[in-house]
């Protein structure tokens, strides 16, 4: 006899198991731990040269930004990070 599955059960069997992520920080730390030296994304510098950023480098950059903001007195405050495009 063939097993009868509802839609939710079919989806659980079809897709890979994924871990629950509580917040952005958790996602960055887990990604850096699992994919440490793999390329997270690529950027282009002002000379037009494309370079890779690893998950570990990205995590370190985010931690550095957070540390700098805390040192500047922004702990517990709301901020927006806006990047101005250089021409």
Image (spheres, rainbow, N blue to C red):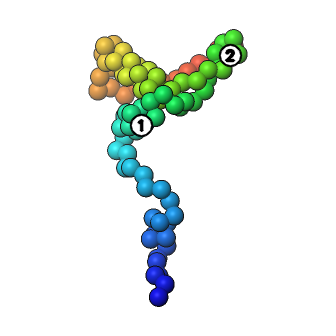
Residue furthest out toward the front: 1
Q: Quadrant of residue 49?
A: top right
From the viewer's perspective, tell me whether residue 64 is left or right of residue 14: left
Residue named by callout 1: 34
Q: State whether residue 2 is above or below residue 32.
A: below
Q: Can residue 31 be seen in this view?
A: yes
Residue beneath the point at 37% across and 22% down: 63
Whole-Å distance between the Cαs marked 1 and 2?
27 Å
Which residue is located at x 37 percent, y 28 percent?
78
Residue 24 in view in this figure:
no
Query: Mark 1 falls on what kind of element?
Result: helix
- Horizontal side of 50 relative to 71 (left or right) equals right
Residue at which label 2 appears: 49
- Which picture quadrant has residue 28? top left
Q: Nearer the viewer, residue 10 or 72?
A: 10
Q: In which quarter of the image is the C terminus?
A: top right
Number of residues whose C-alpha sits closer than 10 Å to that of mark 1, classed few (under 14), some (14–19) or many (20 or more): few
Is residue 87 placed above or below 20 in the rendered structure?
A: above
Whole-percent x and y of residue 24? 40, 37
Comparing marks 1 and 2, which lies closer to the viewer?
1
Q: Position of residue 35 (x, y in %)?
A: 46, 34
Q: Do the residues labelled 1 and 2 touch (CB within 8 Å)?
A: no
Q: State left or right for residue 6 relative to residue 26.
A: right
Task: Identify the element where label 2 is drawn.
Answer: loop
Chain-order first, disc 1 or disc 2:
1
* Residue 9 located left or right of residue 85: left
Residue at left offset 42%, top offset 37%: 34
Q: Which residue is drawn at 42% across and 32% down?
A: 32
Residue at the bottom extreme, as displayed? 1
Neighbor class of circle 2 (other Cα within 10 Å; few <14, some 14-19, many 20+) is few
Name the spot of residue 82 as percent of width and height, x first: 52, 23
């Amino acid at each position: 006899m063939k097993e009868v599955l509802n839609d939710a059960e079919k989806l659980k069997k079809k897709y890979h198991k994924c871990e629950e992520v509580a917040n952005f920080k958790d996602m960055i730390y887990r990604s850096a731990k699992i994919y440490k030296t793999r390329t997270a994304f690529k950027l282009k510098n002002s000379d037009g040269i494309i370079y890779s950023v690893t998950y570990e480098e990205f995590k370190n950059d985010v931690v550095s930004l957070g540390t700098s903001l805390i040192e500047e007195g922004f702990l517990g405050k709301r901020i927006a990070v806006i990047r101005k495009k250089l021409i």
